[in-house]
Amino acid sequence: ADETYLIGPAPSAQSYLNVEKILAVARATGAQVLFGAIHPGYGFLSENADFADRVKAGNLVFIGPSDDAIRSMGSKSESKFIIQSASVPVVPGYHGSNQDPSFLKSEAAKIGHPVLIKAGMRIVRDPSEFDEMLTSSRRESLKSFGDDTVLVEKYLVRPRHVEVQ
């Protein structure tokens, strides 16, 4: 970069996540006239499909994946469906839309304990713990992501971490 601009103070909500300020700086610097591109870096807005949409709507180029790709891969459920459709194995589990607690508990029993409830990464070693862990996971997910949808997967002890991006 040839130029840098202060977007805001250290708290990320006031800087790296401040969409209006980032777009205002892009307009003020004449970014549209030159190359018209915003590289969002890593994390934060780089994984935000709405930000990619706003950049495009402002006649700028978003340097990163398409908004559709961000949405698809940002949803653990949808990304698992896409991956499975490509015949890539995934951890056994339930990642569908039925979020009824009784249904999720029955899916956990089919998978076999221990299971992991995501988001929130709650390990359920015994069926008697399921309801409490589900409630806790949903509360954390709603607070963190604005959505209390969960996945239930087989808990793998000491797995190797492999991430697709």
Image (tube, rainbow, N blue to C red):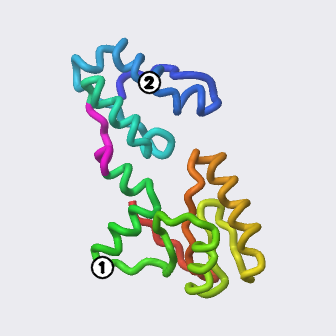
Label located before the other in sequence (1 or 2): 2
Residue found 38% across the figure and 50% down from its top = 71
Q: Is residue 50 above or below residue 137?
A: above
Q: The magenta stretch spans which residues?
A: 61-68
Q: List x then y, in percent, for residue 4.
A: 44, 22
Residue found 46% across the figure and 45% down from its top = 42
Residue annotated with mark 1: 87
Residue 15, label in figure: none
Q: Nearer the viewer, residue 134 or 57?
A: 134
Q: Is residue 28 above or below residue 69?
A: above
- Classify 10 Å Cα crowding around label 1: few (below 14), some (14-19), many (20 and above): few
Q: How many circles with numbers are drawn on the protein?
A: 2
Residue annotated with mark 2: 22
Residue found 38% across the figure and 42% down from its top = 49
Whether the magenta-drawn stretch holds residue 126 is answered as no
Marks 1 and 2, how far apart at CA: 40 Å
Q: Is residue 109 above or below residue 32?
A: below
Q: Nearer the viewer, residue 127 or 32?
A: 127
Q: List x then y, in percent, for residue 136.
A: 73, 60
User: CB atoms at circles 1 and 2 under 8 Å apart?
Assistant: no
Mark toward the viewer: 1 or 2? 1
Residue found 51% across the figure and 22% down from its top = 7
Q: Is residue 71 above or below residue 22?
A: below
The quadrant the N terminus occupies is: top left
Q: List x then y, in percent, for residue 96.
A: 46, 67
Q: Amino acid at mark 1?
A: Ser
- Classify 10 Å Cα crowding around label 2: few (below 14), some (14-19), many (20 and above): many
Q: Name the secondary structure under disc 2.
A: helix
Q: Name the secondary structure under disc 1.
A: loop
